[in-house]
Image: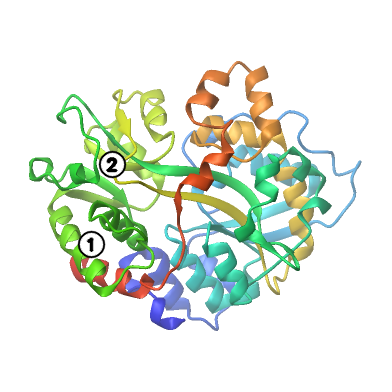
Amino acid sequence: MADLNRHLGRREFLRLAGAVGATAGLGAFLAACGASGATATPPAASSAPVASGAAPSAAATPGPTGTFNWLTWGDHWYQAEMDKIAADIGIKANITSFSDDIDAYTKVQQVGGQIDLVSEDALWVPYFYQHQLIDAFDINSLKVASQLYSVAREFSIWTSPAGYLGYPNGWAPIQITYDPAHVTPGADSWQLLLDPKYKKRVVVEDQPVEVMAYMGKAAGVKDPYNMTDAEVAQAKALLVQLKPNILRLAPQATDTVAALKNGEAWIATINLGADTAVMDQGGPKLTTFTPKEGSIGWMDAEMLVHGGANNNLLMPFLEVHEQAEYVAANFMINRRPLFSEAAYKLLINQGQQELADHLLFNKPETVNTMTLKGPGTSTQAAIAAFNDVFGS
């Protein structure tokens, strides 16, 4: 699948990965990324709550100890949690962040079992399994899985005869948010991103396949991951219109929040809940909507990489990492719904039901109404079109 690779120079992650080479050890790759322990810390991690009672003591629950390699997004963890888990059960995560699903796919293809755990979106999960990059497992073998909403253990796209393909994490529809102090009120369409009066005031995440899907939606395409050549051309034409408005392509959702908070950006595509994070950090009160043409959505999972050198650490780690206390604390930091019903109930007990309900934490079935992220027949063409417009 080398033909799916984006130009390696587009982001430091892939530049470093390419410099190390597919045959090099992950240690060299992580060293190039500056990884010693975890490579990135989400905002507010230093003051994030540490889960109370989430992790059993190492003495009470003897088991394997060591360090595993995790390729994930910055909102799947926070530093206080990682420190507590390491202290309690002796398992550390060596974390490397990425932005786009295709990047994680390319990296796991290159280094295989030198990565142990990888996070991916929706339809990318069965795609990994189809290409024998991950292992299925019995999700109910994890006691913590009983804390999940039942729907999260029954997604058909994540079900195989060999077992479940990933441990469900979070989900959200992509929305558009804007600062009403600078943007004309009443917008309800993807077309807002294209309005020339907002030059250099729009931020979208650096996810080529997804941005092309947004443009596909704006063009009225029914299935933006399986576009015809003509539909790709339509989406690319809108991307050309979008380019002058782009302030920057954000590497992570946290970068989008920062740009909205400091007023550099007036408009952005966001995951559900990013608008509340902006306000909580002292930024403006934003107006948020789901585009009338329909939206892209994601739901993600943690996957066991086939042949991972440290796979024996993963189930003990997940058993603790997915406890309600940690999940609820993660929600308060990153503000998007997660699949843990126990965490939702804990948030109610903590007086956070209004916020949790606002962010649809109690409605996981919503994922069945979204166009889910994933690879498709037009993936290569979408990437090529994006790179033609934004360069390498």
Q: Could you tell me residue 289's position as x and y percent?
A: 32, 34
User: Would residue 392 be seen by someone viewing this image from the given angle?
Assistant: no
Give the residue type that dot 1 points to. Answer: Ala
Q: Label 2: which residue?
A: 268
Q: Residue furthest left?
A: 197
Quarter of the image with the C terminus in it: bottom left
Q: Are marks 2 and 1 in contact (CB under 8 Å)?
A: no
Q: Which mark is residue 279?
A: none
Q: Could you tell me residue 234's position as x and y percent?
A: 19, 64
Looking at the rendered structure, the number of numbered marks drawn on it comes to 2
User: Would residue 390 be seen by someone viewing this image from the given angle?
Assistant: yes
Q: Which mark is residue 235?
A: 1
Residue 340 position (above or below residue 8): above
Q: Pointer 2: residues within 10 angstroms few (<14), some, or many (20+)?
A: many
Q: Tell me which residue sits at (78%, 50%) in the image.
A: 90
**SS at mark 1 in the image:** helix
C-alpha distance separating marks 2 and 1: 18 Å
Q: Could you tell me residue 192's position as x and y percent?
A: 19, 41
Relative to 253, is 64 on the left or the right? right
